[in-house]
Image (cartoon, rainbow, N blue to C red):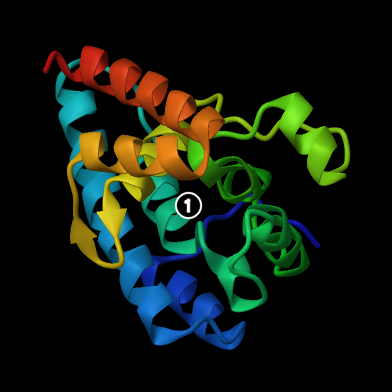
Amino acid sequence: MVSNKLPSREQAIGILRKNNCPPNVIKHCEAVARLAIDIARKLEKKGQQIDLNLVEVGALLHDIGRSKSHGVNHGLIGAKIAESEGLPDSVVRIIKRHVGGGIPDQEADRFGWPKDVYVPLTLEEKIVSYADKRIDKSKRVSINLEIKRLKIEHKDAAESVRKLHQEITSLLGD
């Protein structure tokens, strides 16, 4: 049964533990949530309408799929786990769309994924995806270092993250 009610921060961490997320993944998710909330609050001050609770819960749960896979498909796996937990669709979409700044249709086809949207569309989805790229393990990193790393490993993801960075920083006025 899907609920429209967001879990609390404590409940979200409990869901990660219940699904056997490793402690280092939970620590990463907590760091992403702290940065995502920081970004969301700054955007609110700039006049953006943002659901802060959704940003926090989505960021805490974004890597729940890492309880079963550390591959690119952890977002898809995590979305299925979130659905089975009865989490709201808004949280499921954050989990599904956070990977690599978003997975374009052609790439999703190459992975053999079902037809769906795997790129962040809402501001909350974009904030979580962006914050995730700014956290390595549980430490904040330069977005330029992350983009440079992605250019070597995955050129499409590097471009998606660069565009996401441009969008968020332009909204922040940085």
Extreme residue in the front direction: 152
The secondary element bearing badge 1 is classed as helix
Q: Please, is residue 88 above or below residue 16 in the view?
A: above
Judge the density around disc 1: few (<14), some (14-19), many (≥20) Cα neighbours within 10 Å. many
Extreme residue in the left direction: 174
Asked if residue 39 can be seen in this view, the reply is yes
Q: Is residue 27 left or right of residue 139?
A: right
Q: Please, is residue 138 above or below residue 38 in the view?
A: below
Asked if residue 123 can be seen in this view, the reply is no
Locate residue 11, reporting x and y percent: 47, 74
Q: Quadrant of residue 120?
A: top right
Locate residue 76, reporting x and y percent: 71, 53
Q: Write the residue at 18% across / 43% down.
A: 38
Locate residue 145, reporting x and y percent: 23, 41
Q: Quadrant of residue 142?
A: top left
Q: Write the residue at 68% across / 45% down.
A: 89
**Closest to the observer: 15 or 62?**
62
Q: Write the residue at 19% across / 50% down.
A: 141
> Which quadrant of the figure contains the N terminus?
bottom right
- Amino acid type, label 1: Gly
Q: Please, is residue 10 above or below residue 107 in the view?
A: below
Locate residue 154, reporting x and y percent: 52, 39
Residue indicated by mark 1: 58
Q: Is residue 144 left or right of residue 114?
A: left
